[in-house]
Amino acid sequence: MDNRESLQRTLARARRTLQFLEQQAVRFGLLHIPANLQIELEEKREDAARLEARMAEATSQPQARIAALDTGLPLPRHGPLPPQGQLVLLRSR
């Protein structure tokens, strides 16, 4: 199994875990989520975002990464995704 397959499996597991935790949180309601569940949700969201970023890097255009290495420019980085259900506003420059 190559690194990409392993990463896909890990990401799928993180998404399933996150979905399960989110279902538990919904049962409690926004004001009554236990602290340990809230913390675990935040950690799993961060884990899933990191894995998604790694997956995007692994499947992105390899030529662009090679060119960046050749020129000494920094490699493109993907920031973490916002927690599910939150809007992201983009400002134009």
Image: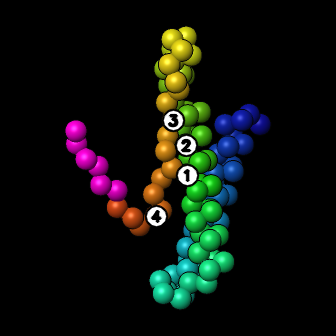
Cα distance between the residues tagged 4 and 1 = 10 Å
Cα distance between the residues tagged 4 and 2 = 16 Å
Instruction: Assess whether mark 3 and mark 2 are in contact (beta carbons under 8 angstroms).
Output: yes
The boundaries of the magenta stretch are: 88-93
Amino acid tagged 2: Ala
Asked if residue 10 is positioned above or below residue 43 in the image, the reply reads above
Q: Which residue is mark 2?
A: 53
Can residue 21 be spotted in the picture? no
| Mark 4 crowdedness (10 Å alpha carbons): few <14, some 14-19, many ≥20 | few
- Label 1 sits on a secondary structure element that is helix
Q: Which residue is mark 3?
A: 77
Instruction: Assess whether mark 1 and mark 2 are in contact (beta carbons under 8 angstroms).
Output: yes
Q: Which residue is mark 1?
A: 49
**Which residue is rendered at x = 69% and y = 49% of the image?**
9
Q: Earlier in the sequence, mark 3 or mark 1?
A: 1
| Mark 1 crowdedness (10 Å alpha carbons): few <14, some 14-19, many ≥20 | many
Q: Which residue is mark 4?
A: 84
Cα distance between the residues tagged 3 and 1 = 12 Å
Marks 3 and 1: which is nearer the front?
A: 3
Q: Earlier in the sequence, mark 4 or mark 2?
A: 2
Considering the image in quadrants, where does the C terminus appear? Answer: top left
**Which residue is rendered at x = 66% and y = 77% of the image?**
36
Q: Quadrant of residue 13?
A: bottom right
